[in-house]
Image (tube, coloured by chain):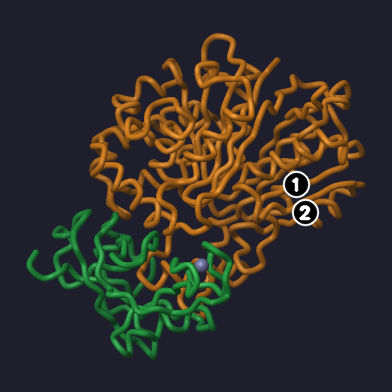
Amino acid sequence: MKREAYISGIGMSEVGVRLTRAPLALTVDAIREAVADAGLTLAQIDGVSTYPGKMSMFLGFSPIGVDEVIETCGLKTRWHTGAAESTAQLGAIADAAAAVRSGLARHVICFRTVYEAAALARPDEYPPMNRRDGVTGNSQWVSPFGAFSAACWTAQFATRHMKRYGMTREQLAQVALNDHRNAALNPRAIVKEPLTLEKYMAARLISTPFCLYDCDRFTDASTVVIVSAGDAIDEVKATPIRIAASAGSVERYSWDQAEWASAYPTGRDLWRNTDYKPKDVDTVQFYDGFAFQPITWLEGLGFCAVGEGGQFLEGGTRIALDGELPMNTGGGQLGWGRLHGFGFAYESVVQLRGAGGARQIKGDPKVAVATSGGGPMAAALLLARD
Amino acid sequence: MTWQRSRVRLDDDNRAFWTGGREGKLYIHKCGDCGGFTHPPRAICRHCQSENIGPHAVAGAGVIDTYTINHQKWAPDMEVPFVIARVRLDDAPDVFLTTNIVNCQVEAVDIDDRVQVVFEEQEGLWYPLFEKARGQ
Ligand SMILES: [Zn+2]
């Protein structure tokens, strides 16, 4: 019999911009909430997984590592990982699922803590990444040409999609419009108001075709999901959500050498790893650090043909809360905040439990897809309520 | 664009790429065994894992695979807007270079435009930029 892995609990800290509480405190807030949500205690936690792990050269991006969490929470762990080179953000959750399926742990805290807005305001404590001097690694191939941001890298894929397949800015705008509409119904989201197409089209450009509303903004928050083993699920009080499948892949490990985003091979692989089909999916939570990325996931996962992602978004009705494929129901990263991948797993669980309140999708949703990553990084989770 | 470009730390893999412009040459790593190109440059061919690999001067001609017009000042001294493009080299299959398209209006740039390398020197580094090929 196949061993199963479940998301048994979810938690989140305050989500804000330029928060002053320490990132470790935010992390512990989210852990406490998730553990309580699952009906567990810290004494039952025996694993920890995070993406990417503490990054001393880029502290705002990832200020908290596994060892601090183990130490602070007094955990007795048997397995842990910091998944910096795993398959994008949600790879940390897929890795935890593999660990509990193989008996290496029973209940794993998976966390992602971001502190980029606070870091920007306090550069002495949290120095920004150096993109000007002694540049090495992948940064050396882009930064000397002013392409400091993933916005510039992703924008080039979007430009090509527009020129080759005819995607319009009005179609692309539907990602931000949908995100803002849903975020306004989510009390934890940073964005409080819907966005109009007029305001979108009038916004200043960042890197064409992206305007301000197409790019997520630095956020301070911690998001946690607890992954539990099937043979430990009796200890869990909340409705468990099964991790039915996962996938992650890389085309070329470089933002500027891959022909297309790794969302395409990852989407293909997700369906190879399960008997579920795209038509079984009730809601999708697609990584949207930049508005073009959900289009690569719509196409990569086969919800539409390659090149038809823009048309799929036309008018926004198909991805709306009452549409055929409700997308980013909690507001995505453009509306909720740059939770950096983990928000999509969190929101999938909310929807599959029917706990979305004003943003809850109709019917009896049983299957969700959560994705993370852009460019060469990609991970996808297929989540199901049995 | 006269901003101070990011200074790259030179090593054995990347030195030819970032200094080849001094001789007017654009160097891309090529394998002496299988003939394949490896970019970013590494000590081992990514096609056949041979160590018989080193910098090879390519013609510096190519086409714009895709681009973006960047409007955001990511650094205070950047002059915007400017074009960031991904150039596909004619004679180095599967190699793309992120670069700037210079010496034309930003609106004049399009996918499939033919381009030719030009070098901009700053403090001993020779940045391979591209301009639209003559006759366009
Ligand atoms: Zn070779």
Q: Residue furthest top?
A: A363
Tell me the tag on residue A49.
1
How much space separates mark 2 and mark 1, taking CA atoms?
A: 7 Å
Q: Quadrant of residue A368?
A: top right
Foreground pick, B123 / A181: B123
Q: Residue at left 44%, top 25%?
A: A303
Mark 1 secondary-structure assignment: strand
Q: Color of chain A here?
A: orange
Mark 2 secondary-structure assignment: helix
For mark 2, what is the residue? A66
**How many numbered discs sit on the rendered protein?**
2
Q: Is mark 2 within 8 Å of ligand 1?
A: no
Q: Quadrant of the C terminus of chain B?
A: bottom left
Residue B93 percent across, percent down from the top left: 37, 61
Dot 2 or dot 1: first in sequence order is 1
Q: Find out whether the residues at labels 2 and 1 contact each other: C-beta distance under 8 Å.
A: yes
Q: Which lettered chain is shown in green? A: B
Mark 2 residue type: Val
Q: Are marks 2 and 1 on the same chain?
A: yes
Q: Label 2 lies in what chain?
A: A
Q: Residue furthest front?
A: B33
Residue B114 percent across, percent down from the top left: 19, 63
Q: Residue at left 28%, top 73%?
A: B60
Drawn side of residue A264 relative to residue A5, left or right: left
